[in-house]
Image (cartoon, helix red, strand yellow):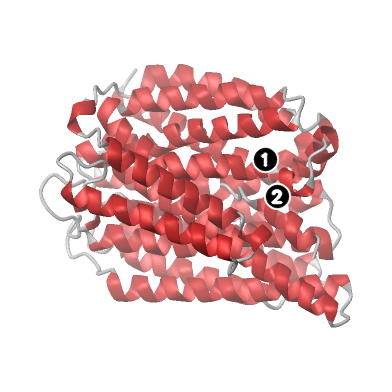
Amino acid sequence: MSAPRSRRLALGVLATSALMTILDGSIVTVAMPAIQRDLRFSPAGLSWVVNAYLIAFGSLLLLAGRLGDLVGRRAMFLGGTALFTAASVLAGVAANSATLVAARFLQGVGSAAAVAVSLGILVTLFPDAAERGRAIAVFAFTGAAGAAIGQVAGGLLTDALGWHWIFLINLPIGLATIALAVRTLPADRGLGLAAGADVAGALLVTAGLVLGIYTVVTIERYGATSARTLGLGALAVALVAGFVVRQATARRPLMPLRILRSRGVAVANVVQILTVASTFAFQVLVTLYLQQVLGYDATGTGLALLPAAVVIGAVSLGVSARLNARFGERAVLLAGLVLLVAMFVLLARVPVDGRYLPDVLPVMLLAGGFGLVLPALTALGMSAARPDDAGLASGLFNTTQQLGMAFGVAVLSTLAAARTADRLALGDDRAAALTSGFHLAFAIGAGLLVVAVGLAYALLRPRTTAGADTPGAGGLSQPGARAGWVRNGSTAAGSAGEVSTS
């Protein structure tokens, strides 16, 4: 097998694994009513079908990324994919609610292990800047469009075969991914556990992230200003702060703080949190608008969202790499963010009696801005990674993505639900009250994106030479051949439940 073909197949394996993971986060959302009926979940218990996955996935990414550097990224990828596939089968045959929640947690663990090292493998597979830019565009497409595709597939599978198949479909895909990964992914021995087995740091960051994500996803139940939420949030912050102190003093830190010395890497991760907080909340809330206000069914909702997936895919795969190479990632990132701001401005004005062509379709087309944003952010998020830190940088980038998802969906859905309750108390009919709640959430989403634009414009400097932002020797140069400069809506069900009952 020729080297170029082998690298392309390896990229396909990584992209397929990421797509499977992201699809699993969104495909379950449209099947929630059927799952609730069959397994007799309570409304509160139902949210843990998605929250169990989110907590395991989001909190273990950083640890899994570093372990990939230590024990070998290929071994970590294969182990994570195998665990995810086995847990999917367990979820598909689950006969009670406890089994399904446990299986979803194990799916999250497997996803974290596989996804955390994927970008690290990718950037070592494609050392040439131009090739890496195209590879990142392909990988980013799986993240940007996978969630929308998952909702279409979830609706079709649930209606045609039953909800069990949204999990069982992962068996053949997972087995094929493992078989191809063994043949195509480069073998690496890793640095060895002695090179960075910071047990205390691992316990601090994992406990802090688990507690932090748990606190965020339960905001809708307990309230953002409740003593419980504030107390757990403060404890989570203290644990993460302890982790940072530990990394500054440990002889073999889990996450060497040098990775954050690059302004591009640090700002890219902050911008990503703001961006995905808005865009993944958009996916959940626009789904609720289509179903609860306009009366779409599950399949119709998935098809209504399909243009967003198509345009994101076309932008990610067709033009983003060339635009990044010609104009630089900073300029492309800013352009994509501006398109997303315009999308949210339109959403903040959608009417109660909206029609698809004039009111919804333009929003779906403007979602193409995410196809510009995510590849640029991905390139920046990996820009300062040395070869032996690539798994860590990948885990960090995916961790901030998950934190953004959890924060955005939980907080914006809570605010939408509160506004809806207020409008119902004032005598509005249900559709008008729901729409008012969505308007508030979309307006706040626009505000978050405006902040992201400001940070990117003010703090990300255009490069004068390729890789100029990368500090120190040995860093992986950024994609782009010339001067110039990015699942799952996992908390969707819990959010949907809160808004729908307001």
The residue wearing badge 2 is: 493
- Asked whether residue 235 appears in the rendered view, the answer is yes
- Residue 455 appears at what percent x and percent y? 36, 73
Q: Is residue 277 left or right of residue 479?
A: right
- Residue 195 appears at what percent x and percent y? 18, 31
Under circle 2, the secondary element is helix
Quote the CA–CA distance across marks 1 and 2.
Answer: 8 Å
* Dots 1, 2 in contact, CB < 8 A: yes
- Residue 317 appears at what percent x and percent y? 47, 48
Position of the C terminus by quadrant: bottom right
**x 45%, y 44%: residue:** 59
The residue wearing badge 1 is: 49
Q: Is 455 situated above or below 234?
A: below
Residue type beneath disc 2: Ala
Q: Which mark is residue 410?
A: none
> What is the quadrant of residue 131 in the picture?
top left
